Image (cartoon, helix red, strand yellow):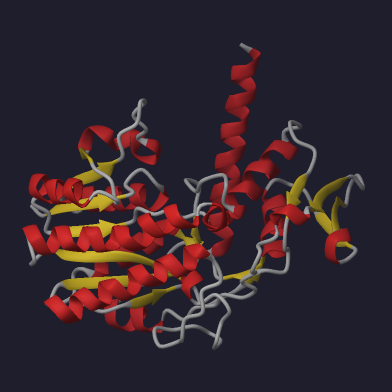
Amino acid sequence: MKNALITGINGQDGSFLSELLLEKGYNVYGILRRKSVVDYGNVEHIKDKIHFIYADMTDVVSLINAMKISQADEVYNLAAQSFVATSWEQPIATAEIDAVGVTNMLEAIRTINPKCKYYQASTSEMFGKVQAIPQDENTPFYPRSPYGVAKLYGHWITKNYRESFGLFTCSGILFNHEGERRGKEFVTRKITDTVARIKLGVADCLELGNLDSKRDWGHSKDYVRAMWLMLQQDEPDDYVVATGVTRTVREFVDIAFKKAGIDIEFSGSGLDEIGKDKATGKVLVKINPKFFRPAEVELLLGTPKKAEEKLGWTREISFDEMVERMVQTDLALVRKEIEYAKL
């Protein structure tokens, strides 16, 4: 049985990856930051199958200890300050976790078990102001947020440790991947959660920023399988993981409402654009300037050709099914909230 150590285990990707590795017979170890109240997050349902270790990406000693305890054969570094908007408010914390934290984890591996395989969660946000369409492994980077800049450091230091010390290190340049376990601060889950609340009569309107932003969206469950495949190869390398299709935020909103049985009609432009319920004429979508980024990333579109050819990776969950899952999950969760409030 292999031992796997996952940082950020209680997040969206960490939970789907944990389930995958447990199915494959791994001993799964997960790093948690110590809090006054233990937060298992998305792995609450499988917490009894996971070995938890208290550590922090900013504390290399704790990561060395985690390596000693887990005796990891594979490390998946999914821990991050991952919300782009917060990175402008907390740029130093973002750099300490998403950039220096990667170096700390690599040093822990190099110190305890240099044969351990390492996966780094890189991001399409490193492309930022895109220099080519679509983006692949050779496209130049141009990050447009402190988050993207910090992640770019993590990406390059991962490559550097591979070339300098011969470590088996891989970076997955993952484009936007969502799912029913996504945090509500992210735009896709904000959309599906609010759509569910509007449908059930406990919210009036969805407020968003730039509806014209284009993203390449897939489902997290498919993307964590790509992470695992990277560490099963004979040689380490970096891979773009994407769908090869881009959609606007407006399209995501339209489909999410349709999944809840509501048809939206958009009118106006810029800050005055609105989305109305076709059946009632009620305004359900508005633009709020506070949700615009200081430096916008207008278009992200990846090509997964290398991952498909070299890893044998294929996407199983379509965009339509992903949105369906998210909306139906949020409808069920909001219904539970409503019932609980009646007690």
In this image, 130 relative to 312: left or right? Answer: right
- Between 14 and 298, the one lying in front of the other is 298
Viewer-side residue, 32 vs 135: 32
- Residue 107 appears left or right of 327: left
Q: Is residue 228 visible?
A: no
Q: Is residue 299 left or right of residue 61?
A: right
What residue sits 20% from the left and 74% below the top? 161
Residue sitting at 74 percent across and 47 percent down?
A: 261
How far across and how far down the image is residue 319, in percent?
A: 56, 63
**Residue 168 falls left or right of residue 78:** left
Question: Where 343 falls versus 33 (above or below)?
Answer: above
**Picture layout, residue 189 above or below residue 150:** above
Task: Examine the image and state in which quarter residue 236 appears.
Answer: bottom left
Query: For this rendering, which residue is in front, 4 or 126?
Result: 126
Assign the C terminus to one quadrant of the image.
top right
Q: Residue sitting at 40 percent across and 76 percent down?
A: 240
Question: Does 295 appear above or below 334?
Answer: below
- Residue 40, x across and y down, in percent: 35, 35
Count of numbered badges drawn on the protein: 0
Residue farthest along the front direction in this orientation: 92
Check the image and report above or below for 30 versus 341: below
Q: Position of residue 193 (x, y in %)?
A: 63, 42
Q: Is residue 46 visible?
A: yes
Task: Depth check: give the residue in front, 203 or 66.
Answer: 66
- Locate residue 67, reporting x and y percent: 13, 51
